[in-house]
Amino acid sequence: MSKSGVPKRRLPTSPFKDPAVTVCDRYAVGDRVIHDTYGLGQVVGIEADIAVLVDFGPQQERIPSPFSKMSHL
């Protein structure tokens, strides 16, 4: 990306590859999830694409994006 926040255009013949774009899962309040460290939980809050608040029973944890260790059930 350039300083203006607009991605740079690359020529099709350019030897440089575009950086990989990762797509974050979308979660909604009430979704049941599983986390590699904390186990089963339910989404109780959302902070846009920044983080989700998940209730894992004895504790609530704020899981920041990207949600690589968490998936939907």
Image: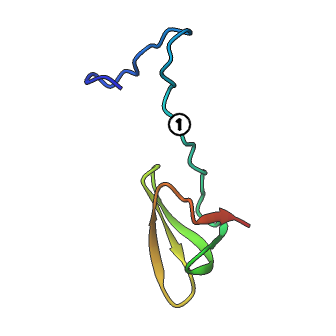
Q: Position of residue 29 (x, y in %)?
A: 58, 63
Please tell me how crowded label 1 is: few (under 14), some (14-19), or many (20+) other residues with Cα within 10 Å.
few
The extreme bottom residue here reads 58
Residue 20 vertical placement versus 30 (above, below): above
Colour scheme used in the picture? rainbow
Of residues 14 and 65, the one drawn nearer to the viewer in this rendering: 14
Q: Give the residue at x 46% y 76%.
A: 61
Q: Residue furthest right?
A: 73
Farthest residue toward the left?
3
Above or below residue 16? Residue 31 is below
Position of 61 with respect to 39 (left or right) is left
What secondary structure is found at the residue carrying circle 1?
loop
Residue extending farthest to the front is 15
Report x, y in % for residue 56. Answer: 56, 82
Judge by depth and name the residue closer to the eye, 7 or 50.
Answer: 7
The residue carrying mark 1 is 21
Seen at 55% across and 9% down, the residue is 13
Q: Amino acid at mark 1?
A: Val
Q: Position of residue 26 (x, y in %)?
A: 60, 51
On screen, residue 23 above or below 5: below
Picture quadrant where residue 22 is located: top right
Image coordinates of residue 64 in percent, x first then y, are: 44, 61
41 lies above or below 57: above
The residue located at (57%, 87%) in the rendering is 57
